[in-house]
Amino acid sequence: MTNKELADIMYPDVTKSIADYEEMYPKRDLPEGAVVSRFAPSPTGFVHMGSLMSSFIERFVPKTTGGVFYLRIEDTDQKREVEDGIKGIVSDLDNFGITRDEGVISEDEEIGNYGPYIQSKRIEIYHTFAKWMVENDYAYPCFCSAEELDIMRKKQESKKGRIGYYGGWARCRDLTNEERAERIKRGDSWTLRIKSRGNENRKCIVNDLVRGRIEFPENDIDHVLIKENGIPVYHFAHLVDDHLMRTTHVLRGEEWLPSTPLHMELFKMFGFEQPKYGHLGLLMKVDEDGTRRKLSKRKDPEAAVSFYHEKGIPLMAVYKYLLTIANSNFEAWLDANPDASIYDFKFDFRKMSASGSLFDVEKMFNIAKNHISRMKASDVYDEVLKYYQEFDASFANILEEYKDYAIKVLNIEREQKKPRKDYACWSDVLPQIWYMFDELYKPEKYEWMNITDQDEIKKIVKTYLDKYYDEEDDKDTWFNKIKSLTDELGYCSDMKLYKENPSAYKGNVADVSTVIRVAITSKSQTPDLYEILKLLGKERILKRIEKL
RNA sequence: GGCCCGUUGGUGAAGUGGUUGAACACACAUGCCUUUCACGCAUGCAUUCAUGGGUUCAAAUCCCGUACGGGUCACCA
């Protein structure tokens, strides 16, 4: 019996040929250097920071090279599948700003000419390719049961041999086509295995984008390509999909590195052009006991997408952080081009760290602070408003009602050469500016510092209002008046003099300004007091003093 | 256990045989500036690049062994 006849028995429903698919999914017409990449998760739960990081890079590189990024769903393992898995992936990607040029864009929609992009809808295509392999003696049906394979593995272990279905262990490899056809007709269940041509003693060279040249022994194991239920395993789906979808760069976690020789053998059998491979290091985290481990969504809140969303960390700041740990020269680039779009940065795989980076929230906050400090007040306002509309509607209403005033408040010590860096995320905003709004100004506690005596406080505030306060003063005049007030009441207005002999004075100008600061805002720490007084205005200041 | 990858300070890292007395950034510490806090500025923080050996006039950089960490060896991805 010929291979062709056997193939017809194994895949009687296949009507198309590989050539048909080649025609349906032609080579992409893209500019030189354009990268086609993809994010290909299985719907087994929500996306965590590690895969989010890869999805970001997989999205970033096509975007900066004029290529294509698509989302493919690898739902070939029905056992691990989770309800609403696709929905979760889509919403995580959307929340994270990972847009797609092609592929799955919502729970039941996809775009692009290279679909379907959900593997469970591509079974016919896989079978066409599988049939071709049987016809050309590159694959064969295997009738070994799970129990038999288990026994085989145990034997191999006890003999301390290499584990796997290869060489003399590959029993079904040597069946005749007649025997195969016979058993299939009889209704025996079977899987499809690659008939590997590899030799363990020969080298297989993987030129990894991140790690460079790596040597492996060639694959000589007859891996299962198609499961008993007719659904392909990852390795086979990778071959078919990434070829047909014309992927140029396969970026994936380093856990795939060891199976790359198998993938290369498959591409070689078909004579397909090999995509470039880049195996990314995993994000790590240090535990209290000092050991490193993979970031976990369950244990590490900062690993969940919702964390950024709920904290209100600007997406662009998260991107900047991801780029600084992804590409070692990004930080220097950003420093030299602080106002450039990150998409002008040239990503270099060789600048990626091969070992997993540690996820450092502190560093990310720092980047976010820098990022926010460079934003215009009106842009900050828009973002802040959007954030509080979702998380604190009453504050959002106030922001809307007093829009112009709110922008001025957000502009304190902003839009200057050395802007203030006090917001790492939007949820930092309310706790730092609530006292600027009368609706929210209900101080429970005044944070008096060095001067706590009520009579003294009254005296300072009263003298200031009666003798020195003038709404029209400019900053220098204002501060000179504070100094005069300080001297009049027996404090020291010159910090140098004060430090030389602190005991000679009741206190210093800092103590006096703190009293005024707390009297007006109830807080001991605020941005520039002059600007705050200016914004609040006379009426409000008087009211607050009265209340006090 | 086999195969593969990795190991530079608290963190991310620069570095591919000699202007590296090991950049830079975060964190930390101290000081300065200063109306508070921040910002900013200055200084400090690895006698040393996991470790042992080798090659070399010269090694974090090349080679070998060891240790440690990670991945993988499924009809999971």
Image (cartoon, coloured by chain):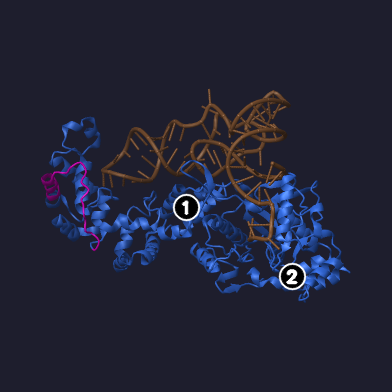
Q: Residue furthest right?
A: A1
Disc 1 packing (10 Å; few <14; some 14–19; many ≥20): few
Rendered residue at 72%/52% (across/down): A153
Element type where label 1 sits in the image:
loop
Label 1 marks a residue whose chain is: A
Q: Is residue A360 above or below residue A308?
A: above
Query: Residue A148 location in percent, x, y?
Result: 73, 57
From the image, give the main secondary structure of the stretch colored magenta: loop
Q: In the rendering, which numbered label is found on residue A299?
A: 1
Residue under the image location 74 percent in, 55 percent down? A262
Q: In the image shown, does A67 or A134 lie closer to the viewer?
A: A134
Q: What hue does chain B carry in this figure?
A: brown
In front here: A347 or A236? A236
Q: Is residue A452 magenta?
A: yes
Q: Residue at x 29, y 63 (%)?
A: A405
Q: Does residue A188 lie above or below B23 as drawn? A: below
Q: What chain is the blue one?
A: A
Which amino acid type is marked by label 1? Lys
Q: Say what amino acid the circle numbered 2 marks.
A: His
Tell me which residue sits at (16%, 32%) in the image. Answer: A504
On screen, residue A380 versus residue A442, left or right, reads: right
Q: Look at the image and tell me in which quarter the C terminus of chain A lies.
A: bottom left
Q: Give x and y (percent) for residue A223.
A: 74, 58
Residue A542 spot, x, y in % from top left: 16, 57
First in sequence, mark 2 or 1: give its number: 2
Magenta range: A439-462
Q: Chain of mark 2?
A: A
Q: Which residue is mark 2?
A: A127
